[in-house]
Image (spheres, rainbow, N blue to C red):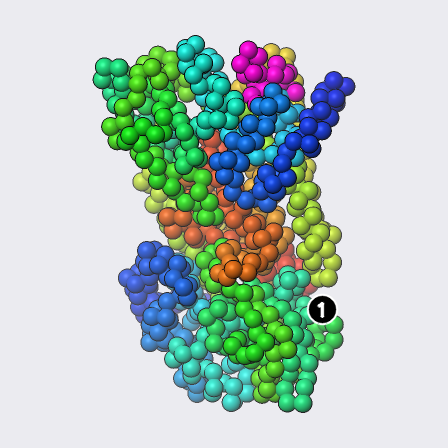
Amino acid sequence: MDLNYSPEEMAFRDEVRAWLKDNLPDELRDKVVHYEELTKEDLLRWQKITAERGWGAPDWPEEWGGTNWTIVQRHIFEEECGYAGCPPRIPFGVSMCAPVLHKFGTEEQKQRFLPGMYNGDIFWCQGYSEPGSGSDLASLKTSAVREGDSFVVNGQKIWTTWAQHADWIFCLVRTSADFPKRQQGISFLLMDMNTPGISVRPLMLMDGGHEVNEVFFDDVRVPAENLVHEENDGWTVAKYLLGYERLGTGNTGASKREVLRLKELAAQQSKNGKPLIDDPRFRDRLSRVEVELMALEITNLRFLDQMRGGRAPGAEVSLLKIRGTEIQQALTELMLEAVGPLAQPFRSLLATDFDQQTASIAPRYCNYRKTSIYAGSNEIQRNIIAKASLGL
Amino acid sequence: MNFDYSQEQQLLTQSVRQFLTKEYTFAARQAIIESDQGYSEQVWTTFAEMGLLGLPFASEVGGFGGNAVDLMPVMEAIGDGLIVEPYLASVGLGGQFIARGGSQTQQQEILPALIAGRCKLAFAQTERQARYNLAHVACRAEKTADGYRLEGEKCVVLHAPCADTLIVSARTAGSPTDADGISLLIVDPSAPGVTLTPYRTIDNLRAADVRFAGTVVPVDALLGPEGQARPLIEVVVDYATALVCAEAVGAMQFANDTTLEYLKTRQQFGVPIGSFQALQHRMVEMTIIAEQARSMACLACVKADSADADERRRTISAAKIHIADACRHISQEAVQLHGGMGMTEELKVSHTFRRLTMLAQTFGDADHHLERFAACG
């Protein structure tokens, strides 16, 4: 057993680190580190910067711009990006729709959509959940009826992240209700957000942030050529994609950065005249989260090693999602406790401002409750482990 | 032994709840928190008319002579409805300082006006480096020929923007963490040298950082003996902590009720999600925690005015430890079981989540009270 990166992997890590040091713009990093809302331009800008280096979509096939990295290299890249404070990759195009197009798309669809994703020209969002279909995705009702060369789409999606920025949306829609199983009769459809009949309503989250939306479809005419894979077999596509969504959800790089920030913060706060970080009660709880993070990181590597040996990613990724989000939430909670009474100020009522450093912590704590809900709630992840790993 | 509210307490609770259910709907509350003032003068007047503002004060000043247990159902209703008016700040904190430490003149000047709804109070205590330590007071009051001159800053003074009167802790002797040398002063927030930086808190209350730069107050602004305010501060904050426990119980009850309702009505996979055992057990745990929290809040309110200071400290801290943990657990689970909806501004449970998050830390988090509890032996 050897738990170290190989010399080549170490060299790769250093290369990524050096590149990030020179190429991650300070203003983007500052926004990420201080929990400020990123604009559409910020998000696309980061995609463009990585694309220029040839790292815009590491896991794509090489002919389309992929890097041909090993699974460990990919992990190192993600980890370093998180640790450095890079904006999140807009996952919907590069990491979600693209793998679908690579596997199921026609050559024309690939030519048409992949370059815009890679170069950060087109902003994508994902239309999956509906008001009545969350964890139970297969019950979705948004309908697409074939009329000549078009589909006519009616219905509603919800929790659509960044729909307010999006140029395009990929959706699961119901093209037929005539099958015995609900998973049948679903199709995977791409839509231009500018198509008449599409409207977006913001859903404000409790921290005041605008991340998610409701998207309404009212007699939206979509060219039939925007159908990906076979009509009525979209569930196959959806299942394929769900595996992708859960990969890389451990976020250990970003959590390591947050641990450092927490330590900094706790050193600035005082308790009975001494730095809070020296308070054993607080320090113990901080240490426990650090140990959890260490355990997650090494588990993550162990799974990567297994996958490198050819094992397909299975329910293990659910474990990473569960523990990864628990750690992220625990860190936001410790920050909240670290600043104590100073966590309360939220929105200044005057032009003069108060300490944004501490004022951003409670909203972050509130916002991060989402992590155990989104991308397959942690309850659903446990169901997956129960069924897929344990055969229960 | 009797854990029930008396008939009088029940009647009052009923009328408070009726008023809040009718007039303080979620939509009405949204309008209030978005208004310029951030609270409703009309609601405050109604509180006065219902006698709520006079509940714990002596009949000599126009009150009803109630104790913390009498306030408990009111605080529960406040927690349930997420009331943003300065009830705790005025009646549970500011008014208590005046009633317990004030001279006859100070009591007569302030309490009848408070009870009539004409005077709101706020307690300016917290400082940037003080955390939850009540003895950490760096703000200074220098004795002058005819009064005191205040220098320093208080932060997160809840309801300061609407307060007519501030009760300010300031150091008249010693160094910032000495137990002795702290005095209380009654300060007009519109006096020269007082600057308020107002803001909304994460749980949609109004608060301010308050800066004193050479603020001069007359000698009769002194509340209680000079340099000896620490014990009074502790007694009043313990009293207010018991009330906060009751408020938290009300908020947790709402969180549990609305989550249970959601589990019964939200359908996935063709059945209510409440039919899943994994979620049932989570809901059961929330129920157990809320029951225990209620018991501890009862204990805290009964002992809030205990003559035995050690017993009072020990009980209040025990209750706050329990309640702080309960607030975190129930608020987090309520949001989780609501899924995405629980995250949104438009659902009340997210507001209750934020309030419970802050109540867990009000007057000290679990760590703070664990230390205090252990120190009681």
Position in image of residue A224 (x %, y %)? 30, 16
Q: Badge 1, how many Cα within 10 Å: few under 14, some, many 20+?
A: some
- Residue A142 is situated, as x and y percent measured from the top left of the image, at 29, 27
Residue A194 appears in view: yes
Residue B268 appears anywhere in the view: no
Q: Is residue B164 above or below residue A248?
A: below
The residue that mark 1 highlights is: B177
Prevalent SS, magenta region: loop
Q: Picture quarter containing residue A53?
A: top right
Q: Secondary structure at mark 1?
A: loop
For the point 47% across and 52% down, which residue is it? B354
Single out the residue that lies furthest toward the right. A7
Depth check, front residue: A161 or B335: A161
Residue B340, picture quadrant: top left
Task: Tell me the residue at 43%/16% (across/down).
Answer: A112
Does the magenta-highlighted stretch encompass residue A60?
yes
Q: Disc 1: which chain?
A: B
Horizontal side, residue A109 vs residue A262: left or right: left
Residue at 36% across, 56% down: B30
Relative to B322, say whether A34 is above or below.
Answer: above
* Residue stretch rendered in magenta on the structure: A56-73
Q: Identify which residue, A85 or B18, lies in the foreground.
A: A85
Q: Residue at x 52, y 86 (%)?
A: B106
Q: From the viewer's perspective, tell me whether residue B126 is left or right of residue B83.
A: right
Location of residue B157 in the rendering, given as x and y in whole percent from the top left corner: 54, 66
Type of amino acid under label 1: Thr
Q: Is residue B163 magenta?
A: no
Please state the horizontal and vertical placement of residue B88, each as a whole percent of the image. Answer: 47, 68
